[in-house]
Amino acid sequence: MRKTIFAVVVAAAVLFGGQASAHSVEQVTVPAAGLHPEGVAWDPTRNALLVSSATEGSVSVVTPRGVRPLAGDPRMISTFGITVDARRGRLLVTYGDLGVSPRSTPETVKKVGGLGIFDLRTGRVLHMVRFGLAPNDVTLDPAGNAYVSDTVSDTVWKVDVGGHATPFATDARFAAEGFGLNGIVWHPEGYLLGVNYTTGALLKITTNRAVSAVTLDRPLVGGDGLAVRRDGTLIAVTNSLGAPGTDAVRTIVGTRGFRSGRSTGLVEWPVSAPTTVAVTPRGAWVLSGRLDVLLAGGSAPDFVLRRY
């Protein structure tokens, strides 16, 4: 136990900007029994990472000694993608029920979902916005509008700063036999990028709702979480949890306007079932929430964050 805590504390020095001799630390195992986070986001106000929970329907802060609860609501059965709106003091997290939570029921699986919006400092509920069948990931534009993917429908939703949800874009390419549109991000050039988990298609969605496929040198089958670096390059996480993908992380360099993209920096991920990635001032950190264990009917005592 001492060794585990020491490892977390040392690695946290990297995550939180400390001065410990931790520059060689590339991975940290965080004790959090049964939490099984699917989403991760950087919170610049705390200088810390936040994680969701497929089992508890909560958001927690990663601390040097594990996790500390930040936000939750009984209506959230499972939580998935997270975005921090530091400018407006908001925390946004998608919620739904994919049947993996102890609170899952036949009446709620793929039937109850939406976006929870919380006060970033206190965790107080600001809005609980219900829509969609299986909301999965969320991103923000500069005006504070949220865009949410839904893995079992053909629609991307928009939620304004007042907490009102409307369908934003609908396209057959968002849907799939299994899981459809999964990770979604706002690109600084002024459009959305989303990945279809089953087909591996990377799709560009403009502000006037036009949808086009990005030409890739190789598809993103099993494409889950996405993040954009400051230079506009895209980080994509793939896994094999629900598609014949591979556990891997890659960088995609796009042309201007992201009409096409080329894969670079492909890394076969040494930790099973990575789901998403958060860009921080100290590098990009990839989350493996032990969802493979959860889907197999088990429960894990921890989760892993590893630098990309």
Image (cartoon, helix red, strand yellow):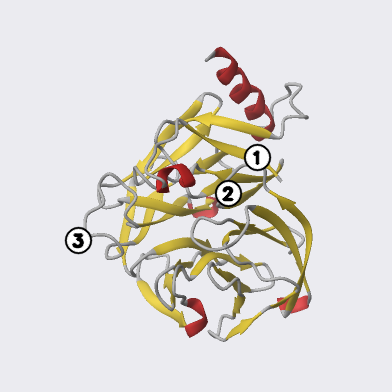
248 displayed left or right of 166: right
Q: Residue at x 65, y 40 (%)?
A: 306
Could you tell which of marks 2 and 1 lies nearer the N-terminus? 2
Q: CA distance from mark 3 to mark 1?
A: 37 Å
**Is residue 148 something that shows in the picture?**
yes
- Disc assigned to residue 274: 2
Find numbered disc 2 in the image and state the secondary structure of the residue it sits on.
loop
Q: CA distance from mark 2 to mark 1?
A: 9 Å
Q: Residue at x 44, y 68 (%)?
A: 151
Q: Residue at x 69, y 26 (%)?
A: 18
Q: Nearer the viewer, residue 202 or 205?
A: 202
Q: Are marks 2 and 1 in contact (CB under 8 Å)?
A: yes
Q: Is residue 202 above or below residue 59?
A: below
Give the residue pinned by disc 3.
Answer: 107
Q: Position of residue 127 (x, y in %)?
A: 32, 57
Give the residue pinned by disc 1.
Answer: 306
Which numbered disc, 2 or 1, marks the residue closer to the eye?
Answer: 2
Kindly indicate the quadrant of the structure image that contains residue 170: bottom left
Q: Is residue 186 above or below residue 275?
A: below
**Is residue 171 something that shows in the picture?**
no
